[in-house]
Image (spheres, rainbow, N blue to C red):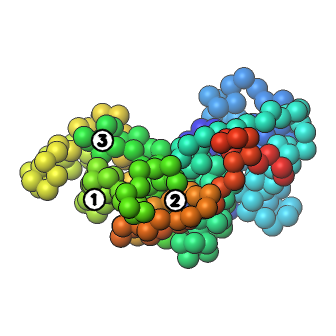
Amino acid sequence: MPWPSVILSFHSPQDYGVLDIHAWRELFGKEPGDLFQNPHRAIEFFERLRMIRRETGLPCRQIERALFTKNRHEGKRGSKASVFGYGEDFLTILALTEHLDVILKQLGDDTDPANCLVFYRPSFGRADLIGEFDAIIITPQTAYLLESKWDRSRISNNVLTLDPVQTSRHEIFKWYHENWKGEDWKHFAQRHADEFKGKFNKSIAPKGSLLSQNLITILKSMRGRELKNVLLYFYRESIPQMDTHFEIVKIKYHPTYDNYVAINQSS
């Protein structure tokens, strides 16, 4: 799906929905080959959603989600394979796609998952630059920076701690969030170079680099929101002590094929 429709639907759900093959098929039938390349396809898609909105009074984003669900779960894609995965990365994407409501509830956030913007493992370079969060969840009021651990992570004396490189990237990202105000990145980097170097012993990502491009995308999406650090912990039985100041979300998982966990494919 093209990023512009994701961002538009997040900021203006009344007027936009996410351009996706499933919603398109419900409205127009078989998708054209240039669905995600031709801007006229997006315009046609948005206009049809707004026509339905005038008839129903529902927001375009809600209409699009209903179309997506109908097409995906009524067998129009044919039989589904059984998908199994292992490890904290798989558990993280499973939680984000199937249990986002549980995560938000434990965080005391009553945002509808449909009104969230989620980035899975956004890339901010190697660990010596910033590294990779396991996920970022953005709601209208808050941006949650997630680190994931599971019951096979390294635990010493029944105490789970985050590595220094993990806590460090939260501090670095917080600095970017608080100091970049949307100005030209080159001017921003020049003005704050000494401060950043003195604080983190690193250099600000140069303008035009992949790191600065990814930072700008995320920072724009979360501007004006409160930052909260979150440890997402997956367990089967016992839960260790957590030596962290992060907010903690605990999710129980159930292996269904030896040590592997299945994606729930029921509607």
User: Which image quadrant for residue 62?
Assistant: bottom right
Residue 2 placement, left or right of 168: right
Q: Which badge, 3 or 2, is on the more N-terminal residue?
A: 3
| Residue type, label 1 | Glu
Locate the N terminus by quadrant: top right
Q: Earlier in the sequence, mark 3 or mark 1?
A: 3
Q: Where in the figure is residue 158, as x and y percent of width and height?
A: 42, 63
Q: Is residue 209 shown to the viewer in this render?
A: yes
Percent across and percent down for residue 8 are 58, 52
Amino acid type, mark 2: Tyr
Residue under circle 3? 127
Which label lies toward us, 3 or 2? Answer: 2
State the image coordinates of residue 182 (x, y, percent, origin top left): 32, 54
The residue identified by callout 1 is 171
Do tag 3 and tag 2 residues touch (Cβ < 8 Å)?
A: no
- Mark pair 2, 1: CA separation: 21 Å
Q: Secondary structure at mark 1?
A: helix
Q: Which mark is residue 233?
A: 2
Q: Residue furthest top?
A: 33
Mark 3 lies on a secondary structure that is: loop
Q: Earlier in the sequence, mark 2 or mark 1?
A: 1
